[in-house]
Image (tube, rainbow, N blue to C red):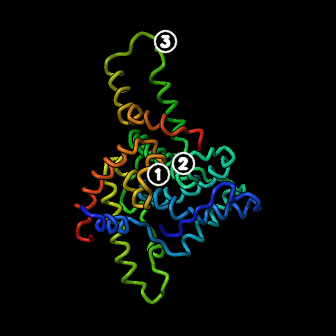
Amino acid sequence: MNDDKEKRLISLLAVRRHEAFWQRQEKEILAAAAGRPSHRKAWLLAPAAALAALLFFTAKPQTPAPAPENQLVSTAFLEHLDLLDDMDVLEAVPENEL
Amino acid sequence: MENEKKTKPEGLAGKDPESAFALLIEEHQRLVYAVALRLTSNTDAAEDITQETFIAAWKHLKDFRGESSLKTWLLRIAANKARSYWRWKKLRNWVGLGRGEGEEGAPALEDLLPDRAGDRPEQAALAADLERRVQAAIALLPPRQREVAVLRSQELSMAEIAAALGMAEGTVKAHWFEARKKLEASLGEYL
């Protein structure tokens, strides 16, 4: 693999848009920042939802141990969310910088 | 890289807030949008992430410690929001609310048109096809390799990528090595 090939690859991966696209986007950002009602998407709340799910599933149980099938569901849920896998990310990139 | 300038937070001082914010957007919107698009494969999500990234950055500019460049700080915010997007998407799929991918989030054809009106139809079709292939190749990468490849494709240095993603520089190099091999295999006909 050589440097020329890397440059061609990087150029290929670039995102190109019409100038009008960038102008429209800039206007939309400025309008949103100017206090017009934000159309905040549900997924922007994902960190809070993930943390809530983690706390819920790791909280000390107040009731007798759940049946094995319930434990399976909990484990599947955690695995599916990749919460454990994401812990390094949450630590490396503090959410309070957002 | 295209349109890259080097405004620092102090470079925004002295301007009225709206002008300073507009300057920040003008200088970095291409970069932030490109990263958001490549990380999510979804144009709607990329526009939302771009918007939220700038608004969050503007709100917290006074808290910016200057330990990294403004550019890497913005990209760190955008990468965080892209991760949030994937967590939300996984959660939706898990509870059975996920939609089929299809053309969801595909770029509008007019956004891919070149500036010169005379070139339009053929170039737009070619650009759209290339865009799909590039996006598909990136989407095949594992998440960490994808993040590194996307930032590298914006011509960030290994050190800048490490700062933006909170990784060791050696880890970034290893991810880029693997990602590059896979991308060259997927997109070899264009290289």
Could you say whether the residue bearing mark 1 is in a helix, strand or loop? Answer: helix
| Residue behind mark 1 | B160
Indicate whether A38 appears above or below B134.
Answer: above
| Residue behind mark 2 | B77
Could you say whether the residue bearing mark 3 is in a helix, strand or loop? Answer: loop
| Residue behind mark 3 | A62
Marks 2, 1: nearer the viewer: 1
Tell me what residue is drawn at x 36 percent, y 83 percent: B122
Tell me what residue is drawn at x 38 percent, y 63 percent: B103
Answer with mark 2 or mark 1, whichever residue precedes in sequence.
2
Tell me what residue is drawn at x 46 percent, y 42 percent: B166
In screen coordinates, is A34 left or right of B31?
A: right
Characterize the local packing of mark 2: few (<14), some (14-19) or many (20 or more) Cα atoms within 10 angstroms.
many
Marks 3, 1: nearer the viewer: 1
Indicate whether A51 appears above or below B181.
Answer: above
| Spot occupied by residue B10 in the image (x, y as percentages of width and height) | 69, 55
**Amino acid under label 1?**
Glu
Q: In which quarter of the image is the N terminus of chain A?
A: bottom left
**Amino acid under label 3?**
Gln
Kindly indicate whether the residue at mark 3 contacts the one at mark 2 (C-beta within 8 angstroms): no
Q: Residue furthest top?
A: A64
Q: Quadrant of residue B54?
A: bottom right
| Closest to the observer, A88 or B42 | A88
- Label 2 in the same subunit as label 1: yes
Q: Which mark is residue B25?
A: none
Q: Quadrant of residue A80?
A: top left
**CA separation in Å, label 2 and label 3:** 38 Å
